[in-house]
Image (spheres, helix red, strand yellow):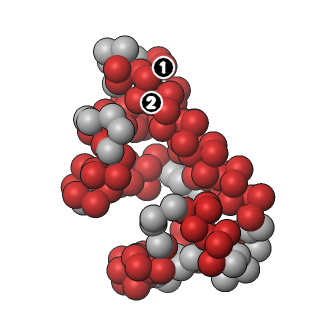
Amino acid sequence: MSAPANLSAEERAELFGGFDPDEHAAEAERRWGGTQPWTESARRTASYTKEHWQRFTAEAADISTRMADALRAGLPTDGEEAMDLAEEHRAHITRWCYDCTYDIHRGLGDLYVEDPRFTASIDAETPGLAAYFRAAIHANALRHQA
């Protein structure tokens, strides 16, 4: 997905910092373009205002911060707190982007550790967070699909 067209360059910089969604848009479209989640996400996010993006990114940051706290506390990835945070993460994606099924969520968790760009970004402040997130996502999916 490309950067929101209805935002100014200043708003994009404020919301996304050094990350430029346009730099990755072509790769993402090659991988997922034409899929139902891609289409749904593009439809939903096309109308998002700056305030929508602020809420979206704040919610995502809050979930990541609490997952990092769980990692630092030594909580198991298959424990209630980590799995609940993984479920909150999945629900966040569903609420804002597309229907994030447990299979899709597992794939996203895998991407967090298989793509070094994701790993570096997620692990920037808390080393090991990408792998912890992935393990909690997988444990949560098992819990809900059992």
Dot 2 falls on a residue whose secondary structure is: helix
Corner quadrant of residue 114: bottom left
Front residue of 143 and 10: 10
Query: Would you place residue 42 above or below residue 114 in this image?
Result: below
Relative to 106, 113 lies left or right: left
Mark identifier at residue 70: none
Q: Which residue is mark 2?
A: 67
Pinpoint residue 119: horizontal percent, then vertical percent: 28, 50
Amino acid type at image mark 2: Met
Q: Secondary structure at mark 1?
A: helix
Question: Is residue 100 visible from the viewing direction of this image?
Answer: yes
Sooner in the amino-acid sequence: mark 2 or mark 1: 2
Residue 71 horizontal/vertical position (percent): 35, 24
**What x and y, as percent, mark residue 133?**
36, 37
Lateral position of residue 100 relative to residue 4, left or right: left
- Residue drawn at (70%, 76%) of the image: 7
Q: Which residue is mark 1?
A: 81
- Please name whichever residue, 19 or 68, is drawn nearer the observer in this view of the structure: 19
Cα gap from disc 2 to disc 1, whole angstroms: 9 Å
Residue sitting at x 74%, y 64%? 50
Residue 138's place in the image compared with 114, above or below, is: above
- Number of marks present in the image shown: 2
Front-most of residues 139 and 47? 47
Q: Amino acid at mark 1?
A: Glu
